[in-house]
Amino acid sequence: MSRPTPFFIEVQPGDTRPLGRQIIDSVRRQIAAGDLPVGALLPSVRVLAQQLTINPNTVAKAYADLCSEGWLESRPGLGLFVAEARERLSRTEQQRRLDQACGRFVDEVLGLDFTSEEIVKRLRAELQPYRARRA
Amino acid sequence: MSRPTPFFIEVQPGDTRPLGRQIIDSVRRQIAAGDLPVGALLPSVRVLAQQLTINPNTVAKAYADLCSEGWLESRPGLGLFVAEARERLSRTEQQRRLDQACGRFVDEVLGLDFTSEEIVKRLRAELQPYRARRA
Amino acid sequence: MSRPTPFFIEVQPGDTRPLGRQIIDSVRRQIAAGDLPVGALLPSVRVLAQQLTINPNTVAKAYADLCSEGWLESRPGLGLFVAEARERLSRTEQQRRLDQACGRFVDEVLGLDFTSEEIVKRLRAELQPYRARRA
Amino acid sequence: MSRPTPFFIEVQPGDTRPLGRQIIDSVRRQIAAGDLPVGALLPSVRVLAQQLTINPNTVAKAYADLCSEGWLESRPGLGLFVAEARERLSRTEQQRRLDQACGRFVDEVLGLDFTSEEIVKRLRAELQPYRARRA
DNA sequence: GTGGTCTAGACCACG
DNA sequence: GTGGTCTAGACCACT
């Protein structure tokens, strides 16, 4: 019987993202980096809510989103587990999302005085840890 | 006697960004790409609003934001003009914004089945046209 | 459980500045003087609007400007907070703004019968309370 | 018979002040610095308007304001001349204007990372040329 | 409850 | 004609 994997999320005071987003992004990164292996059990809604001193509804909503995105799986009565990696989105949908992300990214860095190469280099560093799902 | 530079912007129905954001992003890209040269006169608030069939205040707000970001300059009674490029933000602030943009970008592409190289290649293509302000 | 810091702002009838400007200037001074510490929660848009008997949009606009200038930070659903101080503008941009402010100031005091020393003395007094961000 | 003193005003493209303000400020500075001596004849409204390629109404309005502030004097049929220096405003009114200018100035330099001494030093330099009216 | 966005229409200063 | 300010009221997402 697996106990919840040690699970670290902190709500950063300086972070302006909505709480739910912070949880989702954090879990996704930990899974993608391999820190949360497939089959790992996550802390329950109420435990995590208490730990972060936030509203349980916020946690439940974040978990639900992670399930519908295919990162987590709910086994009723047992809890939430990290799901097997699987292709969920069509190729064209994935391409669409990549395009959209690239567009937003460029909009955000447009006025900054960096060369394309500086930007790409910085981005590579950020991408580096997350190879788990592809290998 | 400078007439407004031909100026193309369309409000895409499928675009989820707020209207004002779409205007801001479009103008910034056209300036950064060199399509709107320094000193160019922009279409008036009322004209653009009518052209896009949106509320003039929405346009005015977008223009105002572009002014405070240093892309445009207002001449009372005359109109809005593309401003001289200048390095407005401190180096550390620029780095902070690049970091933040990279973080958001990775959060968006995390579950997609692309290699880092595929992602970087796609991004390079998106960045390609915008060298004006740096060269 | 932080309640909004007691927050005093009054719309002066004799003040010719736009309402939004009065709010912005007042908040900036209170932050710079240390009366509003980092992390302090500001009164909500609706509450302040009611307190000043002005339109909520006017307050929202002022708050938004303070955010984009880096004085405040928005946490969706929670409210607006005094942001960590950070050097946002480049040195040359800061110099540019100081030059511009000096120019405007001299234009305003030109014809008044004060010596430079009288003017400087008066200005020192005005500057005195605002050392918080620099010290 | 005095001919118009050589008189230099340029409308700066980078200057965002209204045209009328630019004229007023420029004339005041030239008088206060002693470059335009008492009794000097200014170029006529239509000449200056043509020289700057702006609307004569704008020039006329600027000249009228300079007259009502006591910097210029109109001798009907002859033209506009630099007026004798005289105290036009009450002491309390002068004090009120100085206070107001100091307030605005501080509002403009608040977020900049300069010490009071740096600011005062920069301002002294700007004030330096204008002693004519007080001596 | 919070802020964010958009619409609609008024009034002002500037040219 | 231009942009800038303010008011009024609607709808959305987040907590």
Image (spheres, coloured by chain):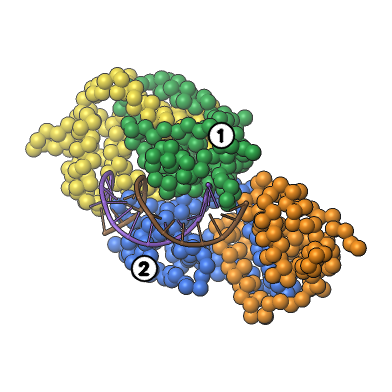
Chain colours: A orange, B blue, C green, D yellow, E purple, F brown
| Residue B84 visible in the shown view | no
Residue that appears at 41% across and 33% down: C10
Residue that appears at 22% across and 48% down: D49
User: Which numbered disc covers residue B77?
Assistant: none
Residue B74 appears at what percent x and percent y?
Answer: 38, 52
Q: Is residue C135 above or below residue B88?
A: above
Q: Chain of mark 2?
A: B
Q: Residues within 10 Å of mark 1 (few under 14, many from 20)?
A: few
- With E9 as the anchor, is C47 left or right in this view? right
User: Which numbered disc covers residue C5?
Assistant: 1
| Residue D51 visible in the shown view | yes
Label count reads 2
Q: CA distance from mark 1 to mark 2?
A: 43 Å
Q: Which residue is mark 2?
A: B53
Residue extending furthest toward the right: A1
- With A90 as the anchor, is D105 left or right in this view? left
Q: Label 1 sits on what residue type?
A: Thr
- Which numbered disc, 1 or 2, marks the residue closer to the eye? 1
